[in-house]
Image: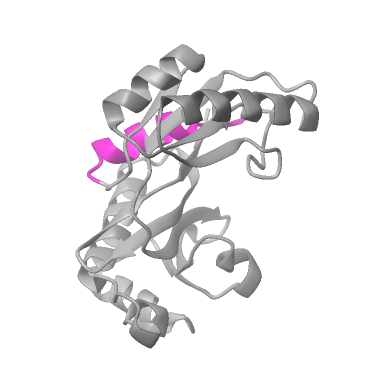
Amino acid sequence: MPKVLTEVESKKMLKAAGIPVVETRFAANMKEAVAISKELGFPVALKVMSADVVHKSDAGGVKLGLQNISQVEKGYSAMMKSVKAAVPNAKIDGVSVQKMARPGVEVIVGMSKDPQFGPVLMFGLGGILVELLKDVSFRIVPVTKFDASEMIREIKGFPMLTGFRGSEPADLNALENLIVSVSKFVGFNPNVKELDLNPVFAYKDGVIAVDARVVVES
């Protein structure tokens, strides 16, 4: 049976492999969530941690941009109430706490295993756009820097990464390095069945994965 790692576990594993992720910590209760928020620095985001809650946002299990202790306390309480109403039998372990990253161009880097070809990497515009537009490119692992460059330029949304209508252009070199790093991570960890970094914020001076999900073969 495949095991879905928590967001905290997934990011810890990826960070150890040199993949840039937003620091995220586990809090078992409101008191811990407040303490971690103070350590990380405001604003922060809270996300419910429960294997029974698949779509966190739909269940009210995500609170973003909390600016102070009072907002963290209120956000935590409101989130627990919403999740329990949406998924009454959910076993809630606690919440993840992470510092809010500054907005950037949202992209996705993912991997799934094809029965014939093995691990296949995917790249595309991230956030909800990946579901809406299905604008993605694929390569079989291992992926070289040249492959990564091609993957980025193949998507129809590529102009979004080059400063479309005055927006900040993305650091394409950092994006290529990220794709290669994920390819190496997959190569070194054959027990990883699938992974999603979505969204990754691409800036003019680097990239960072805001959310991460890793599934391993148990």
Residue 36 is one of the magenta-drawn residues = no
Residue 199 in which image quadrant: bottom left
Residue 13 is one of the magenta-drawn residues = yes
Q: Is residue 84 left or right of residue 125?
A: right
Spot occupied by residue 152 in the image (x, y as percentages of width and height): 37, 75
Judging depth in this view, the residue of 212 and 80 nearest the camera is 80
Q: Is residue 46 above or below residue 55?
A: above
Spot occupied by residue 192 in the image (x, y as percentages of width and height): 45, 40
Judging depth in this view, the residue of 50 and 79 nearest the camera is 79
Residue 201 in which image quadrant: bottom left
Residue drawn at point x = 36 percent, y = 40 percent: 189
Q: Quadrant of the N terminus?
A: top right
Spot occupied by residue 93 in the image (x, y as percentages of width and height): 57, 18
| Count of numbered tags | 0
Judging depth in this view, the residue of 143 and 29 nearest the camera is 29
Q: Is residue 58 left or right of residue 212?
A: right
Residue drawn at point x = 54 percent, y = 38 percent: 63
Residue drawn at point x = 30 percent, y = 43 percent: 188
Q: Is residue 66 left or right of residue 206?
A: right
Give the extent of the magenta segment. 1-18
Q: Is residue 9 above or below residue 165?
A: above
- Residue 135 visible in the snapshot: yes
- Residue 142 visible in the snapshot: no
Residue drawn at point x = 43 percent, y = 64 percent: 107
